[in-house]
Amino acid sequence: MTPTRIKEVLDKLLDEIWPVFVWGAPGVGKSSLVREVASDRNLRVIDVRAPLLDPTDIRGVPSVFEGKAVWSPPSFLPTDGEGLLFFDELNAAPPLVQASLYQLTLDRAVGEYRLPDGWRIVAAGNRAQDASIVHRMPSALANRFVHLDFEVSIDDWRGWAIKNRINPLIVGFLGTRPDLLFDMKNIERAFPTPRSWHMLSDALKGFKKVAESLDVLIGIVGEGAAIEFIGYTADALSEEAIKAIIENPDGCDLPEEVGDQYALISYLAHKANDTRVRKAAGVLLGRFSPELSVLLARDMLRANAKFAVDPAYLAFAAKHQDFLQ
């Protein structure tokens, strides 16, 4: 499932009591997706790293009360309100730890503890084929979850990247090389994932020129992706050329190279809070090919909802509403 589809399904499943398990490769955004769903619903998230638990941690420790042993649950288990109890990396926990969750996931209780009605259980974990440290999930535990498979989607990631102001050069580059958004062909050390590209975006803030950061790039996304990205940035449309287009969107010459077109669109979306940029983008909707215009329109709307009232966008939307759905 794409991230968008998982969010839709997870949001619906939260109305029921059944626990949900999200499977996916490392670094694709499983944990972030769970937090986004919780944020959209204004729910608390209690993040429990399952591999750090001991088998006795879920039930708690016993104490004597009126001659009987009473179990005191751990402080991280909620006692009121509503939210998501999130067991991250669940299948990386030893089998005995996983077994300790049997009663909590099925009966929403363990010992004297009862999970409040407003709380739901969500878990996530990597797959065995991703060379991660995982343990086989006992069938008795697996059968207690609704299982959802996370698939990387360049379209979903692009929307997320624009909203989160990822470096536009990265967004533009991956528009031309979507296969490098996630690539586990060489996983000895660094390799490209949605998480590592986010890391790279933050790292680039400390360098005046991308070319100066090659060793850092290699240490984040791996040698192959780093070299390709450096090559892209060296040949990409310059910021000066983009600013010239923004100043004269009606009469300027538009770039012909696909990489330059993606660089321009990514830059416009990155600067969508600027009124001049939104006006220029509205003009360019009528000058790009229909495919690129739809991409520009979607990216601008993701970046700033004010673009939806731009007269040029309204005219474009009326003409191409089938493509924008």
Image (spheres, rainbow, N blue to C red):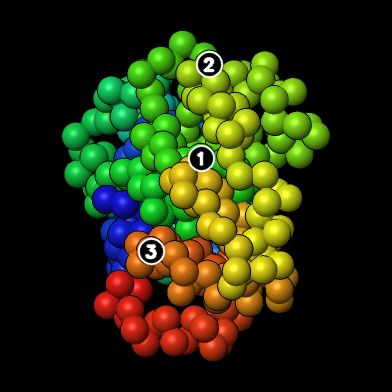
Label 1 Cα neighbours within 10 Å, binned few <14 / some 14-19 / many ≥20: many
The answer to whether 109 is drawn above or below residue 297 in the figure is: above
Label located before the other in sequence (3 or 2): 2
* Residue closer to the observer: 124 or 285: 285
Query: Where residue 302 appears, x then y in whole percent?
Result: 52, 67
Disc 1/disc 3 C-alpha distance (Å): 19 Å
**Image side of residue 203 versus residue 85, left or right:** right
Which residue type carries mark 2? Answer: Glu
Residue lying farthest to the top in this orientation: 188
- Secondary structure beneath dot 1 equals helix
**Which numbered disc covers residue 223?**
2
In this rendering, the answer to whether 99 lies above or below 81 is above
Q: Which residue is mark 3?
A: 289
Q: Residue 280 or 115: which is nearer the viewer?
A: 280
Nearer mark to the viewer, of 1 and 3: 3
Label 1 sits on what residue type?
Answer: Phe
Residue 279, quarter of the rendered image: bottom right
Instruction: Find the distance from the CA under tag 3 to the CA under tag 2.
Output: 34 Å
CA distance separating discs 2 and 1: 16 Å
Q: Secondary structure at mark 3?
A: loop
Please count the marks in the image. 3
Label 2's element?
A: helix
Task: Please tell me which residue is depicted at 52% across the width and 83% down the height of the picture.
Answer: 312
Which sits earlier in the primary sequence, circle 2 or circle 1?
1
